[in-house]
Image: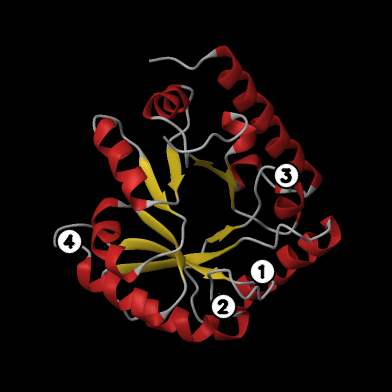
Amino acid sequence: MYASPPLAARIAQLDQRIARACEAAGRERDSVTLLAVSKTRSPSEIGQAHAAGIGRFGENYLDEAAAKQEALADMDLEWHFIGPIQSNKTRAIAARFDWVQSVDRAKIVRRLNDQRPDGRTPLDVLLQINVDREAQKAGCAPETAGELAARVAEAPMLRLRGLMAIPSAENPPERTRAAFAEMRRLFESLRADHADLDTLSIGMSGDLEDAIAEGATMVRVGTALFGPRRDAG
């Protein structure tokens, strides 16, 4: 399998954007990891991205992700669950994914820990923070992150890696930048008690430069990588 010319060009352009943002922030290029958001994308598109050097893929919906994982089982891919977590889906999420970026309550911590299959390495976990305190959005409130982090740290089959946030889509650019700055401060504060934290997952296609300027170590990119989103199926 090979990357189509449009996909290869988008990957090159995206890498240039990340590299320029890192240079502007006085950071090394390898300090920022790219997560390809593959929601609604076909196994063929994911395979092409992998052929072009992309190895990490983020999925929002369990059933959609499971079908792709089966189709691409022969590829060495790292799978991240980045969508809201329903309690009745935790067993499959714990078994199928390498990372879960959307942990936001103690019940989910307990279930993921208890349901991680024996013999697997601990599940890498990010706490999702509702940084803009949106009533309908998943994520814990910033002020409760310390308590939730402590719960994860006590779970033997989970490994706390850091934080994730999705600022409001209604934000003007300056408010999004402020939200990223708030996430950076929270991340640095939590590291006082959890020195191994190494991942701040903020920034997407339209705002990755601001995210990198505020310390993002992972950016989650779909549209800028794969092109305009299509409906699943």
Question: Which comes sooner in the sequence, label 4 or label 2?
Answer: 4
Q: Which circle, 3 or 2, is nearer the viewer?
A: 3
Question: Which comes sooner in the sequence, label 4 or label 3?
Answer: 4
| Mark 1 lies on residue | 183
Picture layout, residue 192 above or below residue 82 = below
Crowding at mark 3 (Cα within 10 Å: few <14, some 14-19, many 20+): few
The quadrant in which residue 7 appears is top right
Label pair 3/2, CB-CB below 8 angstroms: no
User: Which residue lies at the image location 33% right of the left edge and 81% below the top edge?
Assistant: 154
Viewport quadrant of the N terminus: top left
Q: Secondary structure at mark 1?
A: helix
Residue 89 image label: none
- How far separated are the C-alphas under marks 4 and 2? 28 Å
| Mark 3 lies on residue | 206
Residue 190 image label: 2
Picture layout, residue 166 above or below residue 151 = above
User: Which is nearer the eye, 193 or 76?
Assistant: 76
Crowding at mark 2 (Cα within 10 Å: few <14, some 14-19, many 20+): some
Q: Secondary structure at mark 4?
A: loop
Viewport quadrant of the C terminus: top left
Label pair 3/1, CB-CB below 8 angstroms: no
Question: Which comes sooner in the sequence, label 1 or label 2?
Answer: 1
Q: Position of residue 85 (x, y in %)?
A: 40, 65
Question: Which comes sooner in the sequence, label 3 or label 1?
Answer: 1
Circle 1: residue type: Met
